[in-house]
Image (cartoon, rainbow, N blue to C red):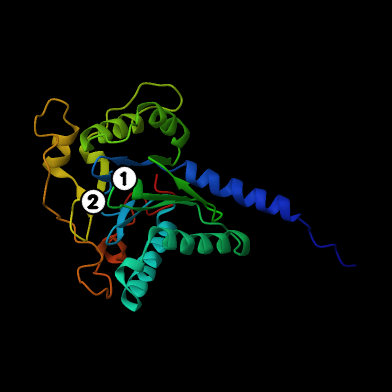
């Protein structure tokens, strides 16, 4: 006697996969992407100094993600390779956030429908333009859906609470210090209504796409500069910095292979590093 195979309707299967992915993403700490007067800022609660949620992809393009670290790191590396190949084969101006978002949408959509487990990730691809009207920010979810965002976007476990605060507090043309103060304050809020936390520079990962920089616009902000920007009483909080201590994946004028990134080297990751197991926490 043969048993009947277990049947699950396509609708139920897709719903189960979506619920699974959303639960994984909700466990991750939030990331905020918002415009300021000179570009686009990325703010994430991330105490790890090795495992980044925000990274450079190309000259004017950056990537931010929440969810399962190994999955969004695979997407980041694939994006760097896609951008390098396109920029080298055609022209650097042919590498755009829109093209990269479409590339990621195809990957995420294929994994969601054809693989046994969907990616537990949510990502943002952002490109800084010559002025604020030309900035592009695309949000991609686990199933490959793409949304064209304007001004700001929040991802992760407390995304709804943070976005509500951004709608009330964000205005076009904010200074970097004001934008960071708004983002950090919202990241420290308790979605359940408890007491707010005061996040320090050591608990944050901050980067910007600065439209006033030549060609490579991405830079990380940390150390004394971040402390000054977060200090409400420090007169140097808006002081610009020309330092770029973190080399990005593109240091040549003609494309080429990405530079070595030790954050993806298994030898540099201890098993007890935050973010190496399950979601990014």
Give the image quarter of residue 161.
top left
Figure quadrant of the C terminus:
top left
Residue 19: where, in percent of width, then height? 60, 45
SS category of the residue bearing label 1: helix
Whole-percent x and y of residue 68?
44, 52
**Which residue occupies 81% across, 62% down?**
5
Mark 1 surroundings: few (<14), some (14-19) or many (≥20) residues within 10 A: some
Question: Is residue 30 visible from the viewing direction of this image?
Answer: no
Give the answer, above or below, for where 218 lies relative to 188. below
Picture quadrant where residue 213 is located: bottom left
Q: CA distance from mark 1 to mark 2?
A: 9 Å
Residue furthest toward the right? 1
Q: Position of residue 104 (x, y in %)?
A: 47, 61
When asked about the image quadrant of residue 261, the answer is bottom left
The residue lying at 43 percent from left, 63 percent from top is 99
> Relative to 14, is 29 on the left or the right?
left
From the viewer's side, name the closer residue of 203 and 30.
Answer: 30
For the residue labelled by badge 2, is the local secondary structure a helix, a strand or a loop? loop
Disc 2: CA contacts within 10 A as few (<14), some (14-19) or many (>=20): many
Q: Along the line of sight, which residue is nearer the eye, 138 or 29?
A: 138
The residue labelled by disc 2 is 211
The residue positioned 61% from the left and 61% from the top of the image is 116
Disc nearer the start of the sequence (1/2): 1
- Check if mark 1's residue and mark 2's residue have beta carbons within 8 Å: no
Residue 234 can be seen, yes or no: yes
Q: Please give left or right for residue 111 compared with residue 244 in the image.
A: right
Work out whether 87 lies above or below 15. Answer: below
Q: Is residue 216 above or below residue 46?
A: below
Residue 153, position as x, y percentages in the image: 41, 41
For disc 1, the marked residue is 132
């Amino acid at each position: 006697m043969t048993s009947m195979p277990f049947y699950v309707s396509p609708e139920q299967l897709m719903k189960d996969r979506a619920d699974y992915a959303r639960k994984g993403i909700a466990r991750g700490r939030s990331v905020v992407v918002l415009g300021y007067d000179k570009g686009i800022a990325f703010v994430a609660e991330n105490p790890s100094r090795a495992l980044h949620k925000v990274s450079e992809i190309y000259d004017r393009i950056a990537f931010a993600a929440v969810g399962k670290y190994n999955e969004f790191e695979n997407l980041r590396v694939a994006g760097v390779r896609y951008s390098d190949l396109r920029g080298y084969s055609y022209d650097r101006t042919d590498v755009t956030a829109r093209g990269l978002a479409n590339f990621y949408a195809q990957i995420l959509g294929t994994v969601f429908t054809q693989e046994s487990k969907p990616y537990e990730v949510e990502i943002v691809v952002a490109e800084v333009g010559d002025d604020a009207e030309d900035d592009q920010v695309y949000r991609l979810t686990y199933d490959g859906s793409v949304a064209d965002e304007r001004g700001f976007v929040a991802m992760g476990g407390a995304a709804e609470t943070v976005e509500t605060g951004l709608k009330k507090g964000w205005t076009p043309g904010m200074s970097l210090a004001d934008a960071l103060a708004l983002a950090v304050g919202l990241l420290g809020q308790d979605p359940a209504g408890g007491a707010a936390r005061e996040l320090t520079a050591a608990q944050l990962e901050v980067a910007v796409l600065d439209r006033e920089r030549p060609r490579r616009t991405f830079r990380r902000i940390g150390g004394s500069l971040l402390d000054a920007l977060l200090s409400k009483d420090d007169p140097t909080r808006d002081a610009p910095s020309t330092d770029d201590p973190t080399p990005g994946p593109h240091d040549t004028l003609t494309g080429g292979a990405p530079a070595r990134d030790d954050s993806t080297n298994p030898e540099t990751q201890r098993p007890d590093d935050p973010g190496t197991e399950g979601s990014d926490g």
